[in-house]
Amino acid sequence: MRNVRFRAFCQNSVIKGVFNVDMIDFQDNLITLRHRDNTDDIEMVDLDVVKLLQYTGRKDENGCEIYESDVIEFLAKDDGETYKAKIVFENLAFRVLDIEDEGYEYDFDNLTDIEVVGNIYENPELLKDAK
């Protein structure tokens, strides 16, 4: 069974960034967020002001969990080249889309030496600095 977890991107008048999710209260439409670098600091915000980012169930070479919206660098098995791609969740599946050509999709299972280098919200420059 896959471990279902989320992070959340929040951009409201008080806080902005990607946070760990402690709790989602669908009845009261609230979400409890924990700062990733200060685990004692939590925020409770309206669920409508966040974008939920689902955990893929995979980790990179450094043990870092890979989430939707992460930007990864990896070695492609077929040509031995290093590429950058972003993780998206579409049509009930995680997809690895090339940053330069979003129409090109990589097979997650054929990637090696995967490393999370950032995410599209906190590191938008990664989308412009593609190989």
Image (tube, grey):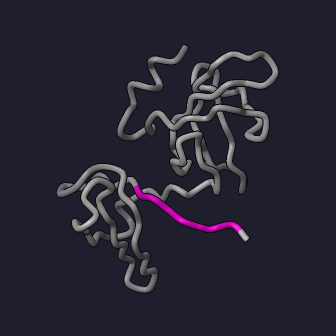
Residue 61 lies, with reference to residue 51, above or below; the image says: above
Magenta residues span: 2-8
Image quadrant in which the C terminus is located = top right
Q: Is residue 33 left or right of residue 97?
A: left
* Image location of residue 119, percent across then percent down: 45, 39
* Residue furthest front as drawn: 62
Residue 40 sits in quarter: bottom left
* Residue 7 lies in the magenta stretch: yes
* Image location of residue 12, percent across then percent down: 25, 55
* Residue furthest bottom as drawn: 27
Give the camera-side residue of 26 and 61: 61
* Residue furthest right as drawn: 78
Q: Is residue 102 left or right of residue 22?
A: right
Residue 45 sits in quarter: bottom left
Q: Residue at (44%, 86%) from the top-left corner?
A: 27
* Residue furthest left as drawn: 14
Q: Is residue 18 left or right of residue 41?
A: right
Q: Residue at (22%, 66%) from the top-left corner?
A: 41
Give the camera-side residue of 37 and 12: 37
Residue 38 lies, with reference to residue 32, above or below; the image says: above
* Image location of residue 98, percent across then percent down: 63, 26
Q: Residue at (61%, 35%) from the top-left corner?
A: 114
Image quadrant in which the N terminus is located = bottom right
* Residue 107 lies in the magenta stretch: no
* Image location of residue 74, percent across then percent down: 63, 28
Number of disc labels = 0
Q: Residue at (38%, 69%) from the top-left corner?
A: 47
